[in-house]
Image (spheres, coloured by chain):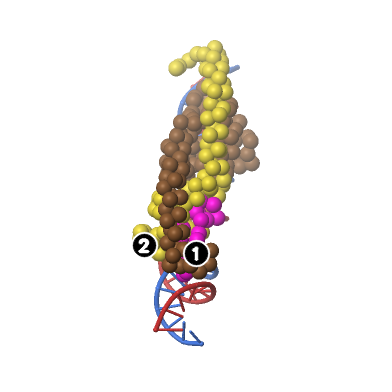
Chain colours: A yellow, B brown, C blue, D red
Amino acid sequence: MDATLRALAEVRRREILALIRDVELPAGEIAAQFDVTRPAISQHLHVLRDAGLVVERREGTRRLYRVRPEGLTDLQAYLDSFWDTNLDRLKHAAEAEERSRIDGSERN
Amino acid sequence: MDATLRALAEVRRREILALIRDVELPAGEIAAQFDVTRPAISQHLHVLRDAGLVVERREGTRRLYRVRPEGLTDLQAYLDSFWDTNLDRLKHAAEAEERSRIDGSERN
DNA sequence: TACGAACGTTAGTTCCTGCTAACGTAGCTC
DNA sequence: GAGCTACGTTAGCAGGAACTAACGTTCGTA
């Protein structure tokens, strides 16, 4: 999940994901969409592949890439976990407000 | 959403979020849980606050922090969008496989 | 087999970011 | 009001990441 977040926390890589979200594209065509060099995109694709966010399929000399949504499930579960305890959190916040209303009745 | 991902893409900040996911804690108590200096944690809290992932509440000289799950909604919607088009993507993959089966019938 | 096309890889540079040390600030207490 | 507490802020540094240039590799083709 650390690799997933590291991979997503870069604009260029998210742009790459947006490109191959619906269609499968070769590395060269992906690189052509950006103003950086081809090796730079190749490195980004490597990071995305290591994170399990894209899959590579070889077709002759070309390497076709497409998004692998399954690579997001762990992160999605992690984010959902913050909402699981939301009720507990609200309860704690209410208790804290009660306490602050008692001893620290200064400002709002 | 860029700020959200940047904020989450750091182990220390995720550890901080884990600490204040259920309970509200003062900055000093949060810093005490780690082996880095207090200013470092203060900077992390600043990043998390800018990303809207935590909220600050002042109580005397103390500043209490707690997680703000609403700050995750944009990211969650973004991640969900990858699954929305999953059926379309499968269709495209099937078509691509068809094409590769016709002209490039080399390996699997 | 030789050549070209479509890639990935490596070395090196620049820029960003997380950290520490030193300093500044708001609020409570005597 | 002086002093203490609990913080945040700033300057400076070190490690890491994104980029380019040069090179290596695999696959198809003449």
Nearest to the observer: residue B34 or residue B106: B106
Query: Badge 1 is on which residue?
Result: A58
Q: Amino acid at mark 2?
A: Ala
Indicate which label's residue lies in the foreground, 2 or 1: 1
Picture coordinates of residue B36 (x, y %)? 61, 42
- Amino acid under disc 1: Arg
Would residue A70 be counted in the magenta stretch?
no
Chain ID of residue with mark 2:
A
Q: Which residues are magenta?
A: A48-65
Element type at marker 2? helix
At 41% from the left edge and 64% from the top edge, which residue is drawn? A28
Identify the residue at image location x=49%, y=31%: B69
Residue position for label 2: A32
Which is more toward the observer, B34 or C8?
A: C8
Q: Residue A74's spot in the image, x, y percent?
A: 56, 42
Instruction: Using residue B108 as the reference point, say whether residue A18 is left or right of it.
Output: left
Residue furthest out toward the front: B102
Placement of B27 over or under B97, stated as above or below: above
